[in-house]
Image (cartoon, rainbow, N blue to C red):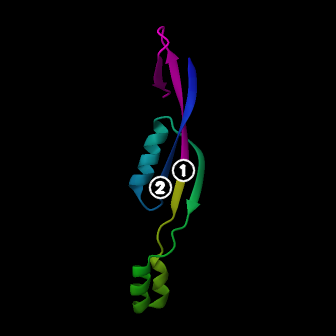
Amino acid sequence: MSSHTEEKVIRIDTKKDADRRHLDQLMSEGWKIKHSSSYQQGYSCGKTCCLGFIFLPLALLGKKPDVIEYVLEKEIKTKISHGGEHVRRQKN
């Protein structure tokens, strides 16, 4: 039996619970976090302008949520049958 690893890249919006649940589901399926990076998205132009007209300090509330990018990996075991054919099995 041999094995190799597969990689998957996903981006998670820090303010969306559904994105976080998706990451949790992948981890329960055997995926492990290999690397993560956080990205700031800056400010939403429309929100910033509208809030700026109402009250300038409130304009800072128009900031978009941060995004975290995860690189996941999972070990995949391959079983070699008698015919020399590879059969992939996921490690759970």
Image position, residue 13 (x, y; %): 46, 59
Tell me which corner region of the image, top left, top right, bottom left or bottom right, holds residue 40. bottom right
Q: Is residue 76 above or below residue 49?
A: above
Q: Which residue is mark 1?
A: 70
Image position, residue 19 (x, y; %): 42, 53
Amino acid type of disc 2? Ile
Q: Is residue 77 a member of the stretch shown in magenta?
A: yes
Q: Which residue is mark 2?
A: 12
Q: Is residue 56 above or below residue 67?
A: below
Give the quadrant of the N terminus.
top right
In-front residue for pair 80/16: 80
Query: Which segment did they paint magenta?
Result: 70-92
Circle 2 sits in a helix, a strand or a loop, which is it? strand
Tell me which corner region of the image, top left, top right, bottom left or bottom right, holds residue 39. bottom right
- What residue is drawn where x is 51% and y is 64%? 66
Side of 52 where 34 appears, left or right: right
The circle on residue 52 is: none
Circle 1 sits in a helix, a strand or a loop, which is it? strand
- What residue is drawn where x is 46% and y is 35%? 29
Most prominent secondary structure in the magenta stretch?
Answer: strand
- Is the Cβ of the residue at disc 2 closer than 8 Å to that at disc 1? yes
Q: Is residue 82 a member of the stretch shown in magenta?
A: yes
Amino acid type of disc 1? Tyr
